[in-house]
Amino acid sequence: MADGRGHTLTPTASQTVGPFFHLGLDWLFSSAVADPDAPGTHLTVRGRVLDGERKPVSDALVELWQADPEGAYAVPGRAPSPGFRGYARVPTDELGAFEFSTVKPGRVAAPGGGLQAPHALVHVFMRGLLRPLVTRLYFADERANADDPVLAAVPASRRETLLAVPRPWASDVFEWNIVLQGPGETVFFDG
Amino acid sequence: MAADLVYRPLPPGTQPEYLHTPYNSTHKRAPLQAPLGLPRTLSELTGPVISPERVPANAADLTRQGAADPLGERIVVGGRVLDEDGRPLRRTLVEIWQCNAAGRYRHPKDTHDAPLDPNFRGSGQAMTDDDGRYCFISIKPGAYPWRNHHNAWRPAHIHFSLFGPAFVTRLVTQMYFPGDPLLAFDPIFNSVSDAKARDRLIAEFDWDATTPEWALGYRFDIVLRGSAATPFEEPRGG
């Protein structure tokens, strides 16, 4: 309709974020998905972004979106959970490392009834990616993973690429690497 | 409300593929496995909303970030942010960044032998208004060399970043300038195989935004994925 021919408009094409995105995007850089005083189980998610040669990607941008401990998203029209932001954006460092401080997300409704396992959505941008990578982060120690409809649709052999693993000596620190290409390639979503 | 958005499949060729051989940086960074279909749960259909109060005052005027005017050709870049039905996306954040008129980014990793401009940082933010309009004042960015291939030069461009109403509407793109002879040779621009979709990355010269004795105007409309559902429409997956 909008182009006058009864057609809908085609979404604008994506282009790479390039190597210099810090210049325009740093004003929202923060690793805090939730502030230290926010209600919930506090944890840290950290990992590295690795390319097809297992080299660290030092010029990636990682964005995370998740629900609060009650399974509610921080959207307008809803009283925000105190200290909970739900979104954070960080660049990787020279070692390809990134880190988020957050609270364990609650369970969110699944289509057709039921609940999803606790998870976060992640966008990855970088030079060499003409459009962002989209993935999901789950928690390896979470029993609800067994019932999650999105995980169930991922081939079993690749499911662990979506699981952040608690450190044996610090169970509030979860490790999760994003492997762009090749063996152990992270599961990405599209469409 | 974001959760009421519906999404149509993207027309083929209107978005770049991850692996685009002429663009060398894709070779070790593009996934080899086909992506899985993105679910459409509340997680994907909501997204971060940056409130207008967080945007600094005058953040849309990139010529007022230094002690004096930056060097270069002053430009006004504006347009509308729309959904797939052409409806305006209101109070959504638009972030931009660019190099200076000499083709140099104010960034520690930009080693191009061109001068920095002490009066130009090269980043800005704006919120769309009730008609989905945004407007930036800046200077025209220069072309600059990159090492993708012999004698490789990026056409002049401005980087854009938008959230829209949902996780799935997130867009990072680049706006180009009409008539740039470098466009035909740029692997990044040409990664969009559909010619019409590619050409929509080129701003239109805009007489209406051109201001006498002051600045040239360019118009760049941006369409984000999805459209508002109506009660008569079944939600469609993508």
Image (cartoon, coloured by chain):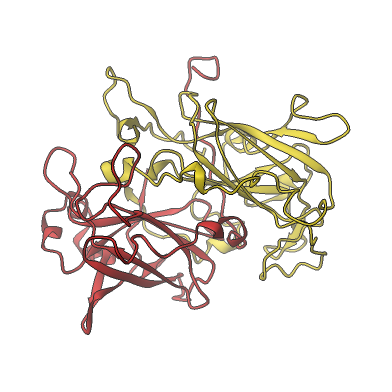
Chain colours: A red, B yellow
Name the quadrant containing residue B210: top right
Q: Nearer the viewer, residue B225 or A119?
A: A119
Q: Nearer the viewer, residue B30 or B45?
A: B45
Which residue is at the far right? B213
On screen, B24 above or below B232? below
Q: Is residue B141 left or right of residue A191?
A: right
Name the quadrant containing residue B152: bottom right
- Residue A26: image x %, image y %? 55, 60
Q: Nearer the viewer, residue B219 or A101?
A: A101
Q: Which residue sits at x=50%, y=57%?
A: A28
Q: Residue A176, can we see it?
A: no
Q: Nearer the viewer, residue B219 or B26?
A: B219
Q: Is residue B161 left or right of residue B44?
A: right
Which residue is at the far bottom? A169
| Quadrant for the C terminus of chain A in the image | top left
Q: Which residue sits at x=60%, y=55%?
A: A24
Q: Is residue B215 left or right of residue A135?
A: right
Q: Residue B159, can we see it?
A: yes
- Residue B179: image x %, image y %? 78, 37
- Residue A71: image x %, image y %? 21, 50
Q: Which residue sits at x=46%, y=53%?
A: A132
On screen, B111 above or below A18? below
Q: How many marks?
A: 0
Q: Is residue B237 left or right of residue B48?
A: left
- Residue A11: image x %, image y %? 50, 34
Name the quadrant containing residue B227: top left
